[in-house]
Image (cartoon, rainbow, N blue to C red):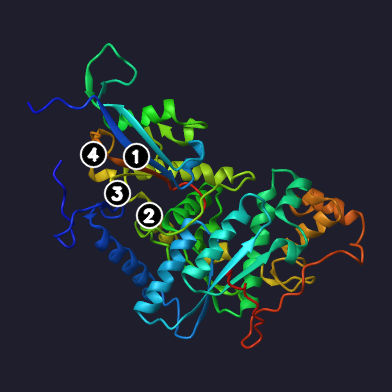
Amino acid sequence: MSVPPAARISLKVEFSGGLELLFSNERTHKLSVPATVPKSYGDASGETKPADITFLVHHLRDNHLKERVELFMENATVRPGILVLVNDTDWELEGEGDYVLKDGDEIVFISTLHGG
Amino acid sequence: MPPRTCALCLANRAMLKRPKTGQQICRDCFFYVFETEVHNTIIQSNLFKPGDRVAIGASGGKDSTVLAYVMKTLNERYQYGLELFLLSIDEGITGYRDDSLETVKRNQQQYSMPLKILSYDELYGWTMDAIVSQVGKKNNCTFCGVFRRQALDRGAAMLGVDHIVTGHNADDIAETVLMNIMRGDIARLGRCTAICTQGEDTIRRSKPFKYAYEKEIVMYAYFKKLDYFSTECIYSPDAYRGHARVFLKDLEAARPSAIIDIIHSGEAFEVREEVKATQKAQQTCKRCGYMSSNDLCKACTLLEGLERGMANAGITDRARKKLDAEGPPPDNLRTIPFYNPPSSGTASITVEAAPS
């Protein structure tokens, strides 16, 4: 085993394409999340896992989202039509919700659902 | 996970998974394939000829912003010889269109293209804000859609352009195919996948992004840091299209090729001649000269209803009959200026002065 993980992870989260309207109209949010979280969200008694994007999405919903949750989440992940980038890379190349967050990561959520 | 290498250049780190092909590619290869596919669409469909004057229908949103950037890039790279313009319609929606037009004005400078803005207020004497205050939020999309279509043609005629290109992307077209199937609108189903449409008196319209996925357009704008505006219209969104859109996005999540597959299905439909023949013959509107399938075009009918305080007259047959029963329109009825379809050399160009 390597060194124990830091207790908390600092992240920069950005919303665009209209999603920022659901998050106090702020595009950029700096936040810190625990490095280790319950395996099933909100269940403190069960097993744990390293914090991943699936955790982050729930965390954003419960702590930062201001309105209309149905425009952000669906079936325990982001709604189809929302693009996610991990340090500027398409999350589909990074394991999507299973991507394990690292200190200093930049996560971008872009809605494609708004008019063109 | 180890970083993946780009499937095309085999050198750089992959940053994007293409929905159309599943390929994992790097940023530079993505720019190259995205632009080249649009170029191939343009060439294969013979959309332009050298010397064409082309207006880009610009809303300030992601699709038209990327379209303006890509059209400028391709025009220079492949020497299409096009003269490009930005054409924006100001529907008069406070807090929505006024903000997005600021984006278009920045695009005008960033891309050094002349910009023409034509407003509903100027053309019809009504802003959408005023229309909604009279008709409410139900049905107002009918007014906006009919008025925008005609305003684009008229704006293009003022610019003296040969051609309007719009930012409709593959997702939009697949949605329209689905909606036409759900409504049983066979005539529209037969034409909605055409890349280029042209009526007798109308200006050519085409969709160079017909095969471009929305995901790639948004990624392109993100990687290129293009300046675009994204807010939903504050008046009732088109609920029916919204359902088609959600359904399509769910299909795409399960199988990314679904979008291009649906477009292909739409293209493969053959509509029999006798079905096409049920469409009314086109004539010109007796009041404003715009193309129409009746004596009065849809915009004139809607406008007359608004002016006479019976806004539904352009929406339902019953309301129209009621309007007609009240007698002919008053002589001082406000009407739309007469439309002179473009013929070479009659253009009157007044473009926006570049903001300093």
Disc on the earlier residue, 4 or 3: 3
In the image, B68 versus B271, the foreground residue is B68
Name the residue carrying label 1: A12
In the image, B99 versus B320, the foreground residue is B99
What's the chain of the residue with tag 2?
B
Tell me the distance, in whole angstroms, between the alpha carbons under discs 2 and 3. Answer: 9 Å
Q: Which mark is residue B222?
A: 2
Marks 3 and 1: CB-CB under 8 Å?
A: no
Q: Residues within 10 Å of mark 3 (few under 14, many from 20)?
A: some
Number of numbered callouts drawn: 4
In the image, B143 versus A85, the foreground residue is A85
Residue B283 at x, y percent in the picture = 70, 72
Picture quarter containing residue B324? bottom right
Residue B245 at x, y percent in the picture = 47, 45
Picture quarter containing residue B356? bottom right
Instruction: Tell me which residue sits at (84%, 64%) in the image.
Output: B334
Q: In this rendering, do the residues under marks 2 and 4 share a single chain?
A: no
Say which element carries label 2. helix
